[in-house]
Image: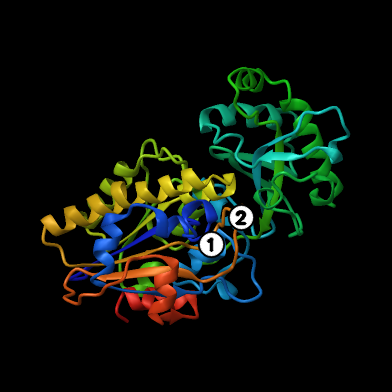
Amino acid sequence: MADKKYIIVLGDGMADEPIEALEGKTPLEYADTPAMDRLSKLSEIGLVHTIPEGMKPGSDTANLSVLGYDPKRYYSGRSPLEALSIGVPMKDTDVALRCNIVTISEDDVPFEEKTIIDHSSGEISTQDCAVLLEAVKAELQNETYQFYVGTSYRHCLIWNKGSVIELSQPHDVLGQVIGQYLPTDANLLRMMKRSYEILVNHPINIERKKQGLNPANCCWFWGAGTKPMLSSFEEKNGLKGMMVSAVDLLKGIAVGAGMGVAHVEGANGGLHTNYEGKVQAALDALKDGYDFAYIHVEAPDEMGHQGSVEKKVQAIEFLDKRVIAPLTDALDKEKTAYRLLVLPDHPTPIRVRTHTGDSVPYLLYDSTAEKKELWNYNERQARESGNYVPLGHTMIDKLLEK
């Protein structure tokens, strides 16, 4: 067991661009983050490039990178990682696809002319979405296509002897007419169209509309990939690791890497998740023989996709006050020696409401450090520091002092 403990706190999509409404600052620079600003004075800050050149910016490739897995070597698609998390038995010939249940417009036009309104159907609960998926499953599931319930709006479709085809990410086309982004595969397109017919007047959606909520009215398939083959995190790094996340993608990466996976009641990947429960799960793991904890917080990314400046700032402030402050306070109180890496996986700028591949700011803190800097933790000062890590999958080596 390691003498020190090692922690990564990842604010998904936290990085952004300067925004006029925030006095020309980014959400991270504008937010009130006393815990991170305190740590930054004793930390190395800089930029790290988490997305390899030529690869799409996504939480899949970026989080693999942050965990020390070169996406160019290990990435086989997003959905297979999520399938691992929910216990889907994948054969080598299977293709996994993400099945979002999204909100599309219900105007009286052909399906191809409808608009995608919300990739998360108003952050619908897993309980409600499972009922909706069951209705789809009852009609569309067969030997070739098998549906599996995930978390909130995020579900899984396994395509027996399928093809890894190019499919559009729904959060990349928000507010746009869907025609040009629909699958070219006839069966997937047929199932999407039929899912809308099944769901548009489902009792749950009728009730959601009455309450002013976005209906979860259409399946959207994307992220196709084959069974992943990750090497063991423990064998690779000599540390026993625990994943703390509400998101199936992160849990799946952990399962594939042989890490532990914490199950936190009330952790939902939204703005109002169980932050305190995540911190406690990480602290419990570090006391219970684990040397490494990865605390993943999805909220900044979700607020970026929603295009809400105010809520993205709030998500970052929650990360600071409800994750980083209590985590470091508890470790300091126990006099635990630890190293902490804080960073986003990728930017999700409010301006574009989707991921970009730009470098992200990191904060690397050692509890035994005595240095005193003047900087705060944000994109601008990270850039000005001059510190730069060009290969994201090597960032963990800095954390682990390799």
Q: Are marks 2 and 1 in contact (CB under 8 Å)?
A: yes
- The local secondary structure at tag 1 comes to loop
Q: Nearer the viewer, residue 65 or 227?
A: 65
In this rendering, position of residue 299 left or right of residue 80: left
Give the residue type at disc 1: Glu
In this rendering, position of residue 305 left or right of residue 371: right
- Residue at the image point whose x is 27% and y is 55% from the top: 34
Q: Residues within 10 Å of mark 2 (few under 14, many from 20)?
A: some
What label sits on residue 351 in the rendered view? 2
Image quadrant where residue 28 sits: bottom left
Give whichever of discs 2 and 1 has the lower sequence position: 1
Q: Nearer the viewer, residue 112 or 91?
A: 112
Q: x and y percent of residue 331 in the render?
A: 18, 57
Q: x and y percent of residue 128 in the render?
A: 56, 27
What label sits on residue 17 in the rendered view? 1
What label sits on residue 392 in the rendered view? none
Task: Answer above or below: position of 6 versus 391.
Answer: above
- Residue at the image point whose x is 73% and y is 25% from the top: 200
Q: Nearer the viewer, residue 402 or 369?
A: 369
